[in-house]
Amino acid sequence: MLFAARSAVALHRLLDVLPVFEGDDRVERYFTLVPGSEFGVGALAAVGRAGGRTIPWDEARGRAFDLVVAASPKGELSELHGPLVLLPHGAGYGKTLPGEGSGGAPSGLDRAYLTSRGRPVAALHALAHPSQVDRLAVESRAAATVTTVTGDPTLERILESAVLRPKFRAALGTGGRRLVVITSTWGPESLLRRRPSLPAELLAGLPYDAYQLALVAHPNEHSERGALQFREPLRPALDAGLVLAEPHEEWASVLVAADVVISDHGSTALYAAALDRPVIAAYDGGRELIPGSPTAELLAGSPRFAGPDSVGAALAGHRPGAARARTGLAFAHQHEALARLRASVYPLLGLDPPAWPAVPRLLPVPARPAGGPGAFAVRTRISGTEVRVERFPDRVGPDGHFLAAESGSAGRRHEETAGLLYRRSPGEPAPHAEGRSAERWLLDTLADHPACQTAGIILSPELCLLASRSGPPLAARIEQSRQDGTAYLPDPAAVLCGLHAWRPAPPPEFTCVTGGRANRVRLAPATPAELARTVWAGP
């Protein structure tokens, strides 16, 4: 059989249906690149990463196959020999591309690509919902005669992996924060093209200890611009902690981990809603969104994006089941798509289907983001024995009451101007490691950085040492907070920020509030054993 792809996103959809044929040694799997797409380079790279056996287009169209599978009807698929199966290219068929095909027709259901000389080009067109059959019949009665409703294999994979949400969030370093995911389709009406500074604006408006931000961009954006050009405009946001999901598989893992999604008119919004994540609509209108489509209905019923405050409002106003209910016309036969697809395509192969079930492959654990902000603009507010701390990445954030920088992660400019300079103690010394006592590091840091008023060392999630220009070194012990059976520890660096705000004489016991959570902190003079702890140089 032959998998024929024009773009990376089409190839990714084809890979999601591999479990239909999994374990069947009667089937030989080949891949080819259908020419004619400006995003073909991305497709070739995706095939390479998947380890697929590729054959050139000229060879593919000169051979006969028992089955040809594609996720886009565009390109010269009629030149291939073998029964063609078309799979869903995205969710909802809610987007039209002006100047392409029949004009106004849904991309993927356009009669201009689905028939040739009045006859369907496909032997089977698999769709995700019966309403899509009705929509296709409006475009082409002939094409509608070869449809079957199987459900959406990509959604099936996402739903199967939803139980891994805690593992995905741990890998991303989300912790007790809310994960905000921006999703952007491709083209001139996409969110990233219209609001390229949005990631940086959100990072500047959402406190770091309350929110984590991720971006899911359409694979065509990665393919069209190339990795360098795609990333460079986002560099300030990436340096400030933005998580950029890889376009194959990882985007879906990040979506599973999300708490709230800000989306344009791309189909990813429907997958987020199917997971019952609140969706914030950030599409400014245009010619691409098809009125009455599932995507249009979802966005119309979602709160509008009106700045960073929209995030908290959407989370507070979300009701369980409300988002999922708005996907009713997009997805049918949930948890059955692979089984139904197998039952439909094996007769075309002339084979009995395997006896074992077709099981969705679990999504991969997302990669841990590299590094994070090295310096923060910090705002604090003291009331009685409580201090509230809000940190914003200095690269994009608003002005704060003081600057806090992490030694070894921040650059020279930040280290020389930070009022609070701290470091994290690595767990294991590197080979041939050099180190200093904790006391020596604290005193040297204050001596070497005239602007620094507080130096701190994070020894563990629950223990920090700090020194100021007045008074002896102190040890701060952070207590866990518990709510509904869940324990929470803040980033100790945020607690050091709270201590710095109380200089020169913090109280012996206080409450530090970060990200809306309160933790008790107890202070005492650092013991000789604590000050003698070796602080190793290292990453």
Image (cartoon, rainbow, N blue to C red):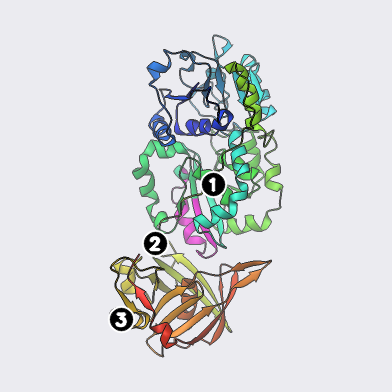
Front residue of 40/112: it is 40
Residue 370: % across, % down: 41, 56
Residues rendered magenta in the picture = 194-214
Mark 3 burial class by Cα count in 10 Å: few <14, some 14-19, many 20+: few
In the picture, measured across the screen, residue 536 lies left or right of residue 13, that is left
Badge 3 amino acid? Asp
Residue 89: % across, % down: 55, 30
Badge 1 amino acid? Ser
Q: Residue furthest bottom?
A: 471
Badge 2 amino acid? Arg
Front residue of 265/67: it is 67
Residue drawn at (53%, 87%) of the image: 508
Task: Check disc 3 and report its element: helix, strand or loop.
Answer: helix
Q: What residue is shown with label 3?
A: 444
Mark 1 burial class by Cα count in 10 Å: few <14, some 14-19, many 20+: many
Residue 83, relative to residue 190: is it above or below?
Answer: above
Q: What residue is shown with label 2?
A: 395
Task: Check disc 2 and report its element: helix, strand or loop.
Answer: loop
Give the mark nearer the N terminus: 1 vs 3. Answer: 1
Residue 147: % across, % down: 64, 20
**Separation of residues labelled 1 and 2 (CA atoms):** 27 Å
Give the mark nearer the N terminus: 3 vs 2. Answer: 2
Callout 3–callout 2 Cβ contact below 8 Å = no
Which numbered marker is on residue 253? 1
Residue 525, relative to residue 24: is it above or below?
Answer: below
Corner quadrant of residue 300: top right
Residue drawn at (41%, 40%) of the image: 222
Mark whose residue sits in front, 3 or 2:
3
Examine the structure image and report whether residue 210 is included in the region drawn in magenta: yes
